[in-house]
């Protein structure tokens, strides 16, 4: 009886693979409230699931102490996951993390919880999308924009762009203040009040002292509601009627974009160059941000 045929030179032999075992169905396991190493055992109670696989599955902590800081603990299937926001061993908020480049979303119960979160994370976090309450909303948060901004300034943070979320809440970006970032006149006024009320924290006061030392405090720029057209820009627009006509029909956002960029120039030659560029842009009927109304409408 002849044995197996010998392989020809240069030809590899392959051992037959065993049949593949069927995969076990994947089971969606609930996250443990104490799974995150930053959460001490007993920081929250047990969790109960809401929703189903493939939907927005919420794990709501059942708090044994009604007076403890409240926070949702949420896990979304897919690329989002939850980190627990912790202050002093207690869960004070919820952070949903999406892509690596995206700031996480933070939900806290109220202004006290936001203050606790900032106290624990103002010097380590790079920014969050903070969920804010619309008028009349108390769940999942009662935190308003004015309350959030006050606490942020106390800890050396500032607010940024706003974003939609749902009918009862919206979100706003909050980040640590960057070195050399300009101050708005509104924030100068708010911080002056917070100092008089004794609410400023060391991190917030450090930003104030830096701004006073390098001149940014005195050079604070006006907000959109109070910004006025400077004389040099007004003269340049008057010399170019088409640019003036376009400036007159700008939306509030586009008008402020021009005034902010002109006012932000630190050198006279930079300011003159920006004014000339904006006048040329407006004469062509162009804007910084898209808008519907145009010359001739």
Image (cartoon, rainbow, N blue to C red):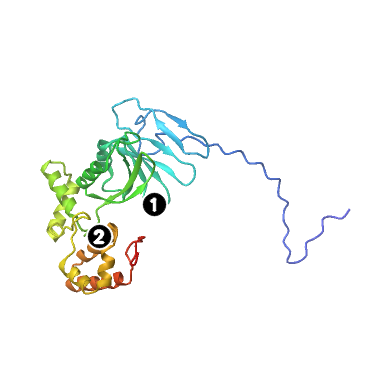
Count of numbered badges drawn on the protein? 2
Q: Is residue 214 left or right of residue 179?
A: left
Q: For the C terminus, which image quadrant?
A: bottom left
Asked if marks 2 and 1 touch (Cβ < 8 Å), the reply is: no
Q: Say which residue label 2 marks.
A: 256
Q: Earlier in the sequence, mark 2 or mark 1?
A: 1
Task: Select label 2 or label 1 by which is in front.
Answer: 2
Residue 272's x, y, as percent?
20, 73
Q: Say which residue label 1 marks.
A: 102
Residue 295's x, y, as percent?
33, 67
**Residue drawn at (40%, 34%) of the image:** 33
**Image vertical order of residue 58 relative to residue 160, above or below:** above
**Residue drawn at (19%, 69%) of the image:** 233
**Image vertical order of residue 195 relative to residue 51, above or below:** below
Residue 164's x, y, as percent?
37, 47
Q: Callout 1: few (<14), some (14-19), or many (20+) C-alpha neighbours within 10 Å? A: few
- Return the residue nearer the eye: 246 or 192: 246
**Residue drawn at (33%, 72%) of the image:** 284
Q: Callout 2: few (<14), some (14-19), or many (20+) C-alpha neighbours within 10 Å? A: many
Give the spatial CA distance, label 2 vs label 1: 27 Å
Residue 34's x, y, as percent?
39, 34
């Amino acid at each position: 009886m002849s044995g197996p045929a010998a392989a020809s030179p240069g030809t590899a032999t392959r051992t037959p693979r065993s049949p593949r075992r069927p995969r076990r169905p994947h089971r969606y396991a609930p996250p443990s409230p104490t799974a995150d190493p930053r959460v001490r055992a007993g920081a929250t109670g047990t969790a109960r699931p809401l929703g189903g696989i493939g939907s927005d599955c919420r794990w709501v902590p059942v708090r044994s102490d009604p007076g403890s800081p409240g926070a949702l603990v949420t896990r979304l299937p897919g690329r989002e996951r939850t980190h627990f926001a912790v202050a002093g061993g207690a869960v004070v908020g919820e952070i949903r993390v999406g892509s690596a480049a995206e700031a996480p979303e933070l939900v806290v119960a109220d202004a006290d919880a936001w203050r606790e979160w900032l106290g624990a994370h103002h010097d380590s976090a790079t920014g969050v999308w903070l969920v804010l309450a619309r008028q009349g909303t108390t769940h999942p948060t009662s935190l308003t924009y004015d309350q959030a901004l006050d606490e942020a300034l106390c800890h050396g943070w500032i607010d940024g762009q706003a974003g939609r979320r749902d009918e009862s809440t919206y979100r706003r970006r909050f980040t640590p203040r960057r070195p050399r970032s300009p101050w708005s006149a509104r924030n100068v006024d708010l911080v002056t009040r917070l100092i008089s009320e004794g609410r400023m924290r060391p991190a917030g006061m450090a930003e104030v002292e830096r701004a006073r030392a390098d001149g940014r405090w005195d050079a604070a720029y006006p907000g959109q509601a109070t910004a006025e057209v400077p004389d040099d820009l007004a003269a340049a627009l008057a010399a170019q009627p088409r640019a003036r006509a376009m400036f007159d029909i700008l939306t509030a956002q586009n008008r402020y974009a021009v005034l902010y960029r002109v006012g932000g120039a630190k050198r006279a030659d930079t300011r003159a160059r920006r004014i000339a560029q904006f006048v040329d842009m407006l004469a062509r009927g162009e804007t910084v941000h898209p808008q519907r109304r145009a010359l001739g409408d």
